Amino acid sequence: MSYIQNFNLYRNLVEEWISKRITVPDLPEKSLFEAMRYSLMAGGKRLRPVLSLAVCDMLEGNREDVMPFACAIEMIHAYSLIHDDLPCMDNDDFRRGKPTNHKVFGEAKAILAGDALLNTACEIMLDAVLADDKDTLGKAAAARIIMDAAGSAGMIAGQIIDLESEDAPISFEELCRMHSLKTGALIRASILSAARLCRADEKTWEALDRYGQYIGLAFQIKDDLLDCEGDAEVIGKSTGSDEKNHKSTYVTLLGIKKAKELLKETVEEAVKALKDLRNTDFLIKTAAYIAERER
Amino acid sequence: MSYIQNFNLYRNLVEEWISKRITVPDLPEKSLFEAMRYSLMAGGKRLRPVLSLAVCDMLEGNREDVMPFACAIEMIHAYSLIHDDLPCMDNDDFRRGKPTNHKVFGEAKAILAGDALLNTACEIMLDAVLADDKDTLGKAAAARIIMDAAGSAGMIAGQIIDLESEDAPISFEELCRMHSLKTGALIRASILSAARLCRADEKTWEALDRYGQYIGLAFQIKDDLLDCEGDAEVIGKSTGSDEKNHKSTYVTLLGIKKAKELLKETVEEAVKALKDLRNTDFLIKTAAYIAERER
């Protein structure tokens, strides 16, 4: 199976699982579920849950054990995009080529759909913890890794720094910390939660942790390059927004050439982190994919 | 100890625990924690965590075991108020006599502070699950009860119905269902999560469940009466908003006199539900307090 076939297999499994879990009941509150599904099923790369499943396969774990946590991470990612796109935040009208959630359902429902996705992510993980009495503490620990990455010590802290950095340039170090929180934390958690569920030993854990941190950084450098050089039609949202919002990015701080060099080095470091592990083919190719993607 | 002294004791324990847990770090994202603390420490009755602790004492459980879950519920309540007060929702400028979160911190931070409170509530419960290997499944089950009540099968569903019922009158049955989701579910969960943690037997569980449903209903009828008859200065927010927003309430559907009769009957049913249990003095007085409160 080629890399892209393997990636698509993982993605299809994730989408199938999510689609079965989030249905639209025939109840007065059905529009809530429609709004949740709208953003959940709007495409997207599914990078985070794909990473979880890839780590699971690499460690020869059980996909069924990892899947609820992988999909919970995707729901957290989806909720963060809905709230991020709101008029009082980034005020984006399009995401993945479709109108953003609040453009379709209105701001109030978009906020509540985001809240409900975060809540559902927790419900799904608790269901997994309660499903049987096998490895209960391990599953709770995986949930804790994910919630830590999503919250005030992770993603949300990064969003606050991002908000405050508009029109107020920040240093390279501050930019790195902001992105390691805003984007990096959840990417890293998708890897480490799967490693925890599959009982990775300490050496494997540490190697995966380093890999996760490097690909998180690579992901963001590439995002900044795409915002500056990318094709808005392919990306599915407007480009040039960083410049418009006077935001510090890897491109504004380093210039395009140096940003591309840093991206290349970062991918090399990610690959190097895996050198003592086995079955790393998919993860190595994913590091390259992150740097080469067009959206 | 008088009822009110006992209530205040519980409330002080809750506020102390929350205040220690949510601190403001000296980091670039400190304003996130300031916004979280602003709403968390802005007073409030603390009815939900007080109920959890009261059920714990009634069942002779360990307060330390119940406290994280009680405070998680209060954080979920606080987040729901922040999001509810936003301009695109109820657009309220005051809450408990103070400017609402978005009036102080702006909409973007208010949304993120709400998100972070929900996330933190989950983190706190998972920490409790992971704290030791005693009753791990019981603690995870208590967390599940709470998240179920807070999410798309509970509070958030109620908020969606509430949103859609503006300018569109709903029936008495629809109103009851809406409130049992929007307000009742979390009140009930504060009782049942504590009952689960303290290993209540089936008879006790069912009695507490009935009690919780009746006081949830009583709470909402009284809220509607306060919005119509209450003193805005005492309540700390503007009154008459239901009429202004053309909302169906127990008062608009039944009239003041019948709403008061229903409130009295509901409190009687709550008390009756407890008749075969012991140590119910505090819970009985809480049912009366809910009907008599002025804010």
Image: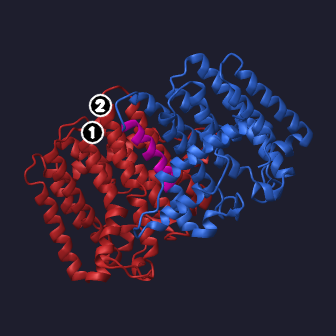
Chain colours: A red, B blue
**Which residue corresponds to mark 1?**
A197
Does residue A239 appear to the left or right of A110 in the view shown?
left
Magenta-drawn stretch contains B118: yes
**Disc 2/disc 1 C-alpha distance (Å):** 8 Å
Identify the subunit bearing mark 1.
Answer: A
Instruction: Work out whether residue A161 can be spotted.
Output: yes
Residue furthest to the right: B257
User: Which is nearer the N-term, disc 2 or disc 1?
Assistant: 2
Amino acid type of the residue that numbered disc 1 sits on in the rendered structure: Leu
Q: Main secondary structure of the magenta part?
A: helix
Q: Which mark is residue A239?
A: none
Among all residues in the image, which is located at the extreme front?
B1
Q: Which quadrant would residue B92 be assigned to in this image?
A: bottom right
Marks 2 & 1, CB-CB < 8 Å contact: yes
Same chain for the residues under marks 2 and 1 in the image: yes
The image quadrant of residue B60 is top right
Residue B12's spot in the image, x, y percent?
A: 60, 46
What range is drawn magenta here?
B116-130
**Image quarter hosting the C terminus of chain A:** bottom left
> Where residue A55 sits: x, y (%)?
22, 46
Callout 1: helix, strand or loop?
helix
Residue type at tag 2: Asp
Q: In the rendered view, does B272 fall on the left or right side of B122?
A: right
The chain identifier of the residue carrying mark 2 reads A
